Amino acid sequence: MSDCIFCKIVEGSIPARKLYEDDDVVAFHDINPVAPVHFMLIPKQHVNSLVECTDEHDAVLAKMLRLAPKLAREQGLDTGFRTAINTGRGGGQVVFHLHVHVFGGTGGKLDSA
Ligand code: 5GP
Ligand code: ZN
């Protein structure tokens, strides 16, 4: 999707602080963090949101969720973290390329993140 900001991050045409990348997934720090550690996992292949996911996305969805604790630990989140997938305008989604937020470092006070 040529007008998708996260596709541009995948392509490398706009910069991001990437912390992980493989053939299917990229993880990068949020540009406007709401917690001391706040990064996102995205599929490289564009899909708008969870609503548009089909069976063909099962593997990448599982991969993102399984990577979350590994990357969280690498970011020093030894005591835990929170994940969020905002879905649709009513779910607070602003960027319509599926992403899994990972928040941590708040000492357990996660209401705002
Ligand atoms: P949403 O509300 O769609 O779940 O969250 C989108 C997130 O993407 C927001 O937390 C926002 O700060 C982040 N974001 C938007 N544009 C960029 C960008 O260009 N680079 C990075 N790294 N994060 C972005
Ligand atoms: Zn995209």
Image (tube, grey):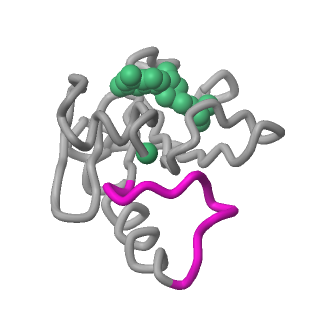
At which x and y percent is residue 41? 38, 48
Answer whether residue 107 is visible to the viewer in this image: no
In the picture, measured across the screen, residue 39 lies left or right of residue 53, that is: left
Question: Is residue 39 shown above or below 65?
Answer: above
On the rendered image, what quadrant is the C terminus found in?
A: top right
At which x and y percent is residue 6? 39, 37
Q: Residue furthest front?
A: 2
Residue drawn at 54 percent across, 84 percent down: 55
Q: Residue furthest bottom?
A: 55
Q: How many marks can you see?
A: 0
Magenta highlight: main SS: loop
Residue drawn at 26 percent across, 56 percent down: 70
At which x and y percent is residue 15? 21, 23
Answer whether residue 18 is visible to the viewer in this image: yes
> Which range of residues does the magenta coloring cover?
43-55
Residue drawn at 59 percent across, 69 percent down: 53
Q: Nearer the viewer, residue 5 or 110?
A: 5
Does 50 lie within the magenta span?
Answer: yes
Does 18 lie within the magenta span?
Answer: no
Q: Residue furthest right?
A: 90
Q: Nearer the viewer, residue 37 or 52?
A: 52
Question: Is residue 74 shown above or below 23?
Answer: above
On the image, which quarter does residue 64 sit in? bottom left
Residue drawn at 63 percent across, 60 percent down: 50
Question: Is residue 111 shown above or below 28?
Answer: above
At which x and y percent is residue 82? 53, 43
- Quadrant for ligand 2 reads top left
In the picture, measured across the screen, residue 35 lies left or right of residue 54, that is: left
Q: Nearer the viewer, residue 6 or 39?
A: 6
On the image, which quarter does residue 11 sit in? top left
